[in-house]
Image (tube, grey):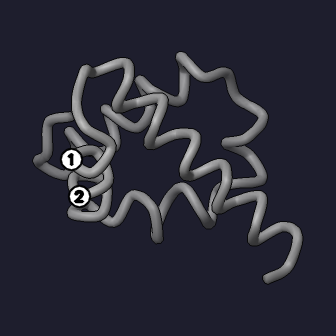
Amino acid sequence: MAKEEAQALYFTVFLINHLADKLGESVSSIYRKLKMVNAISDYIIPCYDVLHTQGAEYLMEDLQEYAKLRGVTL
């Protein structure tokens, strides 16, 4: 695994865990919901270069909005 791929993976894990803590849900529940709307494969990983420069609070709101626009409430 390339260094950038590993960093994107760690970042994704951070986002899922942080969002689960913020919303009081399980990590597996948040993962399933994000996977359902393709947030990981179509948004987080491809946009890692930009997203990892943003603050955690912004990212939590952004992911919630991303899911909401695709019909899933986090």
Q: Looking at the image, which is closer to me, 27 or 23?
A: 27
* Furthest residue toward right: 3
Q: Residue at x 21, y 47 (%)?
A: 29
Judging by the rendered image, the residue that carries numbered circle 2 is: 32
> In terms of secondary structure, where does tag 2 sit?
helix
Q: Amino acid at mark 2?
A: Arg
Q: Is residue 37 left or right of residue 42?
A: left
Measured along the vertical axis of the image, is residue 67 above or below residue 48? above
Q: Residue at x 62, y 66 (%)?
A: 46
Residue 29: which numbered mark, if any? 1
Q: Amino acid at mark 1?
A: Ser
Percent x, y of residue 53 = 78, 34
Q: Residue at x 52, y 39 (%)?
A: 15
Measured along the vertical axis of the image, is residue 57 above or below residue 62? above
Which of the 4 image quarters holds residue 14? top right
> In terms of secondary structure, where does tag 1 sit?
helix
Percent x, y of residue 62 = 44, 32
- 10 Å neighbourhood of mark 2: few (<14), some, or many (≥20)? few
Q: Looking at the image, which is closer to me, 15 or 28?
A: 28
* The N terminus, quarter of image: bottom right
Q: How far apart, in angstroms, are the residues tagged by discs 2 and 1? A: 5 Å
- 10 Å neighbourhood of mark 1: few (<14), some, or many (≥20)? few
